[in-house]
Image (cartoon, helix red, strand yellow):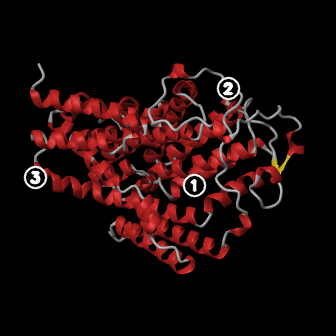
Amino acid sequence: MFDFPTLFTLTLFFLMVLFLIWRPHGINESIPPTISAILILLAGIVPLSDVSKILGIVSGASITILSTIVMSIVLDSIGFFRWTAFNLVKLAAGSGVLLYWYINLLCFLMTIFFNNDGSILITTPIIIHIVTILKLKAKQQFPYLLSGALVATASSAPIAVSNLANLIALEIVGLDLNSYVSMMFVPSMIGITTISLLLFYYFRKDIPKRIASIDGKSFDSSSSISHDSLADMNDPPNYPPPHHLPPHHPPHPLPPHHLSHPLPDSVPHLPSASTNNAAEIDMSLFKICMAIVILIRAGLFVGAGFDIPIEWIGIFGALVLIGYRWYRKGIGPYDILKKTPWHIILFAFSIYVVVYALHNIGLTALLVKLLREPLSANYLSASLISGGLLTVMSNLFNNLPSVMIGTFTLAGMGLDQPTLHVAYLANIIGSDIGSLIIPMGTLASLIWMFLLRKNGVRIGWWDCIKVTILVIPIGLIISLLSLYVWVEWLFY
C-alpha cells in the first residue's frame, strides 16, 4: 500500500511528464515542473531547508547554458546562420551526399559550441531553409532533417557544457570538466559517428545523388538555383502559395496514425529565412565575434583547471559579445532580453525539486538495493547496466529527470570513485544518446518536432521511431562498450 507522500509524488511526476510532452495550448515547458514543484514544497515532501541547496546545484549550470544561448542570439543577429546555410549548399557543389555530411558536421559543431537545445533551435531552421530552396521532396528532406536532429542531440555527450543535465550531474559525482572530456570524448564520438553512418546507410536510397547548386551570392532561390544540376532528380513538387500554409498549432506531439508513411511527396513551401545577400555580412565583425565565442568555450576548460566557476566565464563571454556588437552595430541588448529563455533556471530548479521528492520517497533507495551488487561487479557491468537503465528511463520519462534519478542512485551506492565515474559517464551516454529512440526522450527532440510543425513539415512520431529503433540501440551499445575499453585501457 502506497502512503500519501509516495502516491502524491508519483502522481505529480507522471502528470508533469504528460504535460511536458503534450503541452496543451503551447504552454511553456517550465509550467508543468513549476506547478509540480510548488505542490511538492507545499506538501512538505521536499523541506524548504533544501531549497537553497537545490538552487546552489542548478543555478551555475543553468547560467552557463543561458550564456551560450545569448551568444547564439548575437551570432544570429549578425547573419551567421544565414551565411552558414548559404555556404553549406555552396560547398556541397550539387552533391546530396556531401550535403548530408556537411549538415551532420554543422549540427555537431553547433552543439559543441552552444548546447543541444540551442543547437536544435539554430540548425533546424537552417536545414529547413536549405531543403526548401533546393525544392527537395519530403522523402528527400527527411534524411537531412532527422539525421541533423539526432546528431545535434547526441553531440551533447562529448563535453559536459553542452547539456544542462550533464552539468548538474557532474557536480554531484565530483568529476571536473577536463576529466569528463578526457574520459568521454572518444567513446561518445565513436557512438555519434556510428549513428551517422547507420543513418546514411538507412537513407542511402532517399538521399539524392545530385541536388541543385547555388551560383552567385544570393539566397533568392528564383535567381540562385542552377536547375541544370536537377537532371537526374524527379520534378520538384508543386508548392501552394503562402496563404495555404497550415495554421500554427500548439506544440503537442501528433500520434503516429496522423501521418502515413512513406512521407508525402510534397510539403508546404516554407518562407525562406532570408533573401538577403550573403555578402552583406560584416565579415570583420563576424570574425571577431566567432573568435570571442571560440575563446570563451576554450576558457571554460582552462578555468576548470583553476577552479573558476564556469558560469562566470560564460557570463563574461556573453557580456563581451553583447558589448562588442553594441559598439560596432549600435544594437543594444533589447533583443537579448526579449529572446533569451530565462525560464530555463526555473525549469531546472523545478525539475530538480520533483526528482528530489522521488529520492525522498525511496525510489533511489530501491534502485540502489536492486543494482548495487551487479553494477559494482566490474567496469563493463557498470557501463552496460547504468547506460541501459538511463536509456529505458529517458525514453519513458524524458532524460532530464531520468539522469538526475540515475545520478542520485549512483551517489547512494557507496561505489569506489573509478566505478562511480564509469557508471556516471554511462548514465550520460544513456541520457544523451539512448534517449533518442522516442521523441519524448529529450526536450531537444520535442523542440525539433515543434519547429517542424510550425514550419509546415509533416513528420510524425512513427516516421522517426521506425528509423531510430534500428539505429540508436546499435550506437548506444557501441558507445558503452567503447567507454569500457577506453577507461579500462587509459584510466583505471
Can residue 196 be seen in this snapshot?
A: no
Q: Position of residue 110 (x, y in %)?
A: 55, 55
Q: Residue at x 85, y 40 (%)?
A: 230
Q: Residue at x 25, y 33 (%)?
A: 13
Q: Earlier in the sequence, mark 1 or mark 3?
A: 3
CB atoms of marks 2 and 1 within 8 Å: no
Instruction: State the mark number for residue 264.
Output: 2
Frontmost residue, 251 versus 478 = 251
Sort mark 1 into few (<14), some (14-19) or many (20+) by Cα contacts within 10 Å.
some
Frontmost residue, 230 versus 164 = 230
Quadrant that contains the N terminus: top left
Give the residue pinned by disc 3: 49
Q: Quick check: 28 above or below 21?
A: below
Task: Name the element at disc 1.
Answer: helix
Q: Earlier in the sequence, mark 2 or mark 1?
A: 1
Say which of marks 2 and 3 sits in front: 2
Disc 1 marks a residue whose amino acid type is Leu
Q: Is residue 308 left or right of residue 105?
A: left
Disc 2 marks a residue whose amino acid type is Pro
Can residue 115 be seen in this snapshot?
A: yes
Instruction: State the mark number for residue 109.
Output: 1
Give the CA separation, mark 1 to mark 3: 41 Å
Q: Earlier in the sequence, mark 2 or mark 3?
A: 3
Disc 3 marks a residue whose amino acid type is Ser
Q: Quick check: 218 above or below 443?
A: below
Say which of marks 2 and 1 sits in front: 2
Give the CA separation, mark 2 to mark 3: 55 Å
Quadrant of res 385: top left
Give the CA separation, mark 2 to mark 1: 31 Å
Q: Position of residue 232 (x, y in %)?
A: 87, 35
Q: Residue at x 39, y 33 (%)?
A: 21
Quadrant of res 303: bottom left
